[in-house]
Image (cartoon, grey):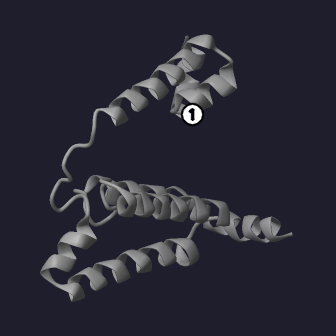
Amino acid sequence: MAHLARLAHRHPDAVGLHHVTRDWKLGLVAIIGFFAAIVASLEGELPPARFVEHVFRDAGQTSVLAALALAVCLAAAFFAILYRAPLARAERYAVAGALFGFTIASLMNSYPTPLLGYGAAPVIGFGLALGLGRGKVKDNAAADAAALD
C-alpha cells in the first residue's frame, strides 16, 4: 500500500495510476469518475460566478478597453511563460499549454478564467510551477539544445 501512496504522489490522476500499476481498483475509480461526470453534465449547469467565470464578457459590458487590457495581460503572461521563463523547453511548454487550455475552456463555457478570475491560489500555483525548474537553469540550456537535435 505504501508503494501506491508514493505513486499517487508522482501520478495524481486515477487513469495514470491505473496505467502505471495495473491495479483494477484504480481503473474502477476512473470508470466511476467518468460516469459521474456524465451524470453531472446531464443535470445542467450552475450559473457563472461573477468575477470568476466569463471575465472578458463582464469586463466588456463595463468597458471594452478594460476587456482588451485583460486579454493583452493574459496573452503577455502566456508568451512570457512560453518564451522567457527560466525553465527547460518541455517545462515551459507544459505550463504555457496548461494556461492556454484553461483559457480556451473558460472562453467556451462556465470555467474560471486563469490568472484573472480566481483568487490567489492559481497565481501561486503557476508561480510554483515556474519556480520548480529555476534551480536547474544551467541544465536547462543543455536540455533545450538536446531537445532541438
Tell me the residue at 32%/61% (across/down). Answer: 113
Q: Where residue 20 appears, x then y in whole percent?
A: 68, 26
Q: Which residue is mark 1?
A: 11
On the question of residue 26 being in view, the answer is yes
Q: Where residue 48 appears, x then y in whole percent?
A: 20, 53
80 sits left or right of 141 in the view: left
7 sits left or right of 112 in the view: right
The N terminus appears in which quarter of the rendering?
A: top right
The C terminus appears in which quarter of the rendering?
A: bottom right
Tell me the residue at 33%/60% (across/down). Answer: 123
Q: Where residue 44 appears, x then y in whole percent?
A: 27, 38
Residue type for callout 1: His
Mark 1, residues whose alpha carbon is within 10 Å: few (<14), some, or many (≥20)?
some
**Numbered disc 1: secondary structure:** loop
| Nearer to us in this view, 64 or 133 | 64
Q: Where residue 30 appears, x then y in whole percent?
A: 52, 24
Q: Please tell me whether residue 35 is drawn above or below residue 126 in the rendered image.
A: above
Tell me the residue at 17%/62% (across/down). Answer: 51
Residue lying at the far right in this picture: please name it.
149
Q: Please tell me whether residue 94 is drawn above or below residue 137 in the rendered image.
A: above
